[in-house]
Image (tube, grey):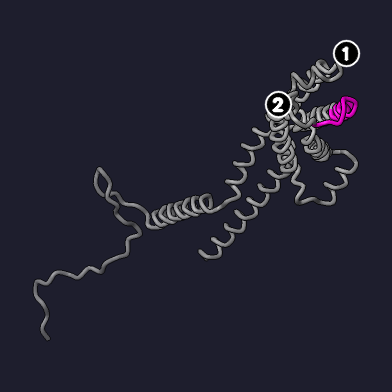
């Protein structure tokens, strides 16, 4: 039997629970389990950040919320402007209408202002009406919301006040046109006689007063609850629901 002479003894390799990672100062031994956990946490964090960025880019509710909040601030300013403008306007009309010459002075002074002021009224009333409807989200009423509105426990009554003011303003358009078109050089008079003119102007002045009072009253109701915003809450609730569903879907996909 032949035996190897001078052969080195064989050494069996052993498993080492370490890996050597290159750093700036050289190679450093790191536990395999610890390294695997760090790498898994890094991949999960990157995946969550990627999903979050995609969600923020894809959702439209976030953009709707931002737009609504900007419009809410702007419309609140318009509602306050409308109330102050209405007060100044009605005081101005009553002051110039108190004369012994009937409404001649009123027509003479107000003639070039009738259409611009009526257009400004219309613009501010439309913005205010749309804003108050958005604020209370009247398109999606709930049973509790309807009960609180009917019992005047919230400011939803401002919606009806603004609608009334807008309706009155539209009803006055014909009279505003007559005042603007009134001229002594016209071939055909706009009124049959002075008595009919004064009677119609009195009704117009009463409607102007109603329009001003309703605009001021609506602003007072809004100022009592300036932070009320049902639409923003409903959009936020929908946004959270979509985000929750997206997270669940991503988790199932990863599993």
Q: Quadrant of the N terminus?
A: bottom left
Figure quadrant of residue 248: bottom right
Q: Position of 77 compared to 156: left or right? A: left
Looking at the rendered structure, the secondary structure element under dot 2 is: helix
Nearer to the camera, 224 or 107: 107
Residue furthest to the bottom in view is 1
Residue placed farthest to the top in the image?
100
Above or below — where is 122 with respect to 84? below
Mark before the other along the chain sequence, 2 or 1: 2
Circle 1 sits in a helix, a strand or a loop, which is it?
loop
Say above or below: 110 vs 121. Answer: above
- Image point (69%, 30%), residue name: 120
Q: Which residues are magenta?
A: 190-204
Label 1, residues with CA under 10 Å away: few <14, some 14-19, many ≥20: few
Q: What residue is shown at x 51% (from left), y 51% (from top)?
A: 57
Q: Check contact, mark 2 vs mark 1: CB within 8 A.
A: no
| Disc 2/disc 1 C-alpha distance (Å) | 33 Å
Q: Does the segment drawn in magenta span residue 8?
A: no
Q: 80 or 41, which lies in front?
A: 80
The nearer-to-camera label among 2 and 1 is: 1
Q: Position of residue 64 (x, y in %)?
A: 61, 46
- Check disc 2 and report the residue beneath it: 81
Question: Dot 1 corresponds to which residue?
Answer: 100
Q: Is residue 192 left or right of residue 47?
A: right
Q: Residues within 10 Å of mark 2 (few under 14, many from 20)?
A: some
Main secondary structure type of the part rendered in magenta: helix
On screen, residue 50 above or below 83? below
Residue 14 shows in this picture: yes
């Amino acid at each position: 039997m032949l035996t190897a002479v001078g052969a080195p003894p064989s050494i069996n390799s052993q498993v080492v629970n370490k890996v050597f990672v290159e750093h700036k100062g050289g190679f450093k031994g790191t536990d395999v389990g610890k390294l695997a956990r760090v790498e898994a946490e890094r991949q999960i964090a990157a995946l969550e950040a990627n999903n979050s960025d995609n969600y923020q880019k894809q959702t439209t509710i976030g953009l709707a919320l931002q737009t609504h909040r900007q419009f809410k601030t702007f419309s609140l300013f318009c509602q306050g402007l409308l109330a102050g403008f209405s007060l100044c306007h009605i005081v101005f009309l009553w002051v110039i209408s108190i004369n012994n010459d009937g409404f001649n002075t009123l027509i003479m002074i107000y003639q070039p202002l009738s259409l611009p002021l009526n257009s400004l009224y219309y613009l501010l009333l439309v913005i205010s009406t749309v804003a108050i409807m958005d604020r209370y989200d009247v398109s999606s009423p709930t049973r509790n919301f309807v009960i609180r509105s009917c019992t005047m426990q919230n400011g939803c009554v401002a919606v009806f006040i603004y609608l009334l003011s807008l309706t009155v303003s539209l009803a006055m358009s014909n009279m505003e046109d007559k005042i603007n078109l009134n001229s002594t050089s016209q071939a055909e008079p706009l009124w049959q006689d002075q008595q009919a003119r004064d009677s119609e102007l009195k009704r117009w002045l009463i409607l102007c007063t109603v329009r001003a009072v309703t605009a001021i009253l609506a602003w007072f109701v809004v100022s009592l609850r300036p932070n009320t915003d049902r639409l923003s809450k409903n959009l936020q609730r929908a946004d959270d629901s979509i985000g929750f569903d997206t997270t669940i879907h991503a988790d199932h996909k990863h599993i």
